[in-house]
Image (tube, coloured by chain):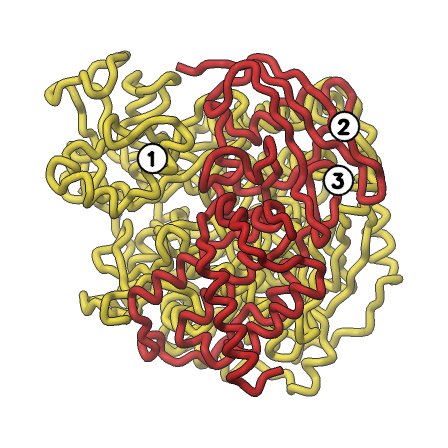
Chain colours: A red, B yellow
Amino acid sequence: MSNTINLTLKIWRQQGPHDKGHLETYEMKDVSTDMSFLEMLDVLNERLTLEGKEPVAFDHDCREGICGACGAVVNGIAHGPMKGTTLCQLHMRHFNDGDTIVIEPFRARAFKLVKDLMVDRSAFDEIIQAGGYISVNAGQAPEANTIPVPADKAELAMDAAACIGCGACVAACPNASAMLFVGAKISHLALLPQGRPEAAKRALNMLRKMDELGFGNCTNHTECEAVCPKEISISNIARFNREFIKASFGSREK
Amino acid sequence: MKLDPKVPGGPIEQKWDRHRFELKLVSPANKRKFEIIVVGTGLAGASASATLAGLGYNVKTFCLHDTPRRAHSIAAQGGINAAKNYPGDGDSIWRLFYDTIKGGDFRSREANVYRLAQISNEIIDQCVAQGVPFAREYGGLLANRSFGGAQVSRTFYARGQTGQQLLLGAYSAMMRQAAAGKVTMFPRREMMDLVVVDGCARGIIARNLITGEIERHSAHAVVLATGGYGNVYFLSTNGMNSNVSAIWRAHKKGAFFANPCFVQIHPTCIPVHGTYQSKLTLMSESLRNDGRVWVPKKPGDKRPANEIPEEERDYYLERKYPSFGNLVPRDVASRAAKEQCDAGKGVGPTGYAVYLDFRDAIERDGKEVIEKKYGNLFEMYERITGQNAYETPMMIYPAVHYVMGGLWVDYNLMSTIPGLFVLGEANFSDHGANRLGASALMQGLADGYFIIPYTIGGYLAGTALGDVNEEHKAFRDASMEAEERVRKLLSLKGHRTVDDIHRELGHIMWEYCGMARSYDGLNKAKEFIPALRETFWEEAIVPGDGKQLNQSLERAGRVADFLEFAELMVDDALSRDESCGCHFNVAYQTEDHEAKRNDETCCYVGAWEYRGDGQPEILHKEPLVFEYVDLIQRSYK
């Protein structure tokens, strides 16, 4: 049932943020096409370990496409060639015998490289800290059904809330903009009645923080939507822009 | 030492209220003077950090990942239970309490489970207010669905991503407190040890995974919310980084470990397909609502599923359990699948799989209806296996999913070390010998949002804690030990990779301490594990150095702990002379091969005390007393 293929991998190796990096070539023989992409890297790492070399560092955890830890640029595309798929859910049956695969980290000014394919995405946490929440302490909440939410609004909010914070949108954007990430959070909360009281402040503060951290602006390349493993729509960026304009002109928030 | 669960007196409905009244309070001005360490940022850790900070405590929160939002709670699919009774179908706090006790096969503490059911409703209120986008009816009110082990619809859900949405809710609440300066985040840190001063937990030793630095962090209390140890089996549905290390170190510092052999094996996972496989993927339990489970009647039948005629198929769950059919609880369904495969009737390339067939459901309801209900799951299945489950049946097999065992805690969620609190999957908690679906999320958030904020106050207000700083001898000693341990691991330059040894440990545990256990098999495991531990320390390779990011070193440390811990699991399984819930000892079964409890001698929580390397651990028993429910034989026939 299972087929095997031979591959040439070119993987970005970089010891640390201040070291110079380079692409290293590895030949992979008899790769089972049932493997996931990360399992293929596991096999390589086992081999490197046995050869006394340092394995390739990469972030990963759930391997179910939901934690957002994994991600690399594969042949120029963040998370690789399959649409709506994280790297951990990409399987080798989508590659052909003899393929050369180039694997590089997500690159953006705001994502400092840690090692090899690992980058520091803590900038996303800082953006969320700037307003990506609803202020309610445990115990303050009213009975849940006192806040009805129209089903279509709840669905749209859920579409946006599905973001896994992987950073592929930033890596794919020529401006390294985080507008899709921020737009998704703004939309999720702005669409819900619970999120309205803080909507203006949230839009202004999150945008300001995004700029401050060195993310670029949106110039409608829509690369972010194309690579998003959760297929989050750029209409969330439009909603973010509307929220920002409303906040700038229609509220007292600064 | 006598285990005191500190269950408050009075009728069960009033225990929690009464206890909250009796607990001492810390005044707002004094809360500012206390520091609390929280390790882990899943549902329990994130909700605890946010709430404690919201109350005014200074919280230091640690996680392994680059950001706290990645904890494995995020992968929970199905939902979260609450006794809201919105559908008006007869649910109540009592019923949720009873279902949970019964589902756990009567091996949990009544008062804790009742409190969990009471709090369940507040959790939904809290999460809705935070903006968790739960599924809604067209009128805008909250929707519910049903789950295994219950006859009412009490499960709240956000598509198939309920865990993600609840975790992001707790995470954002914690980020709000980080912005306010009340939570200090320490990402990419691994807890190396617990620091105990004058008998009380006063801090931790952590390793900075980026720089390799061994750090000392002091506090007035320590909260562990570090999840479960399912990865002791190598393959499980857990995240790759989930581990036992934090609670194991705390155990070695004096915290008793309760019911370590209670491991839930989930019946519907994608089967193992190769030796390179790194983890198993769960397919939601909800699939069993419409899918029919079967195997060929003839052992070794290798024909493709669609060529096997109806009369040659054995729908064994429907045959054996006519009233619950394909919806029997998880432990029952898992064991039945194993039984079929062991009889040679398993399917797929390895023979370790059974079919989950939607043919009849598609014929009955049409493909569109099935697609609407389960489309994302079919898609996930195809992504992983390359097969279209609308055309050929899915293949599934049980996989390790959740652990009911964990550090022993009293009613206050405090371990046997004063000042060390344990929340979520990391404690032995409220699920007894088997957890019902959609109850893990409930427990994690109950512990973090609504229990620890009260009980930790009671501890801090009622305990005289001296000043302890990071130069204290206990910190120096613990950090030196941690450094020594790192050095020792890095000196391993053998010829086997850590993963290879971990995989072998997984085989031993799966074979002898898995779905069906026997005294013989457990005794074998007791020989194999120490031998493998020796192999590890002689033959493993750990490349690289300790002064920078080194993922091999991280894994090696965790596997070294699993190799110690595995033996305790086996001891625990050996000590429990009965079958109950997930723990199935073949010596104790009914004529129909169902788990046979022994309420006379085994109605207890088994809590193990560590006494030093190479010393056998001592088993302490906390008797379980049932005042409000009758102990009955579970029957799903």
Query: To which residue does mark 3 refer?
Result: A115
Q: Quadrant of the C terminus of chain B?
A: top left
Q: Quick one: label 3, few (<14), some, or many (20+) residues within 10 Å? A: many
Residue B462 in which image quadrant: bottom right
Q: Which mark is residue B237?
A: none
Q: Marks 3 and 1: same chain?
A: no
Tell me if label 3 and label 1 are in contact, CB under 8 Å: no
Spatial CA span between label 1 and label 2? 40 Å
Between B296 and B258, the residue placed more toward the observer is B296
* Chain for numbered disc 2: A
Total number of numbered labels? Answer: 3
Q: Is residue B510 above or below residue B404?
A: above
Percent position of residue B145, x then y: 26, 57
Q: Is residue B140 above or below residue A172?
A: below
* Chain for numbered disc 3: A
Spatial CA span between label 2 and label 3? 12 Å
Could you tell which of marks 2 and 3 lies nearer the N-terminus?
Answer: 2
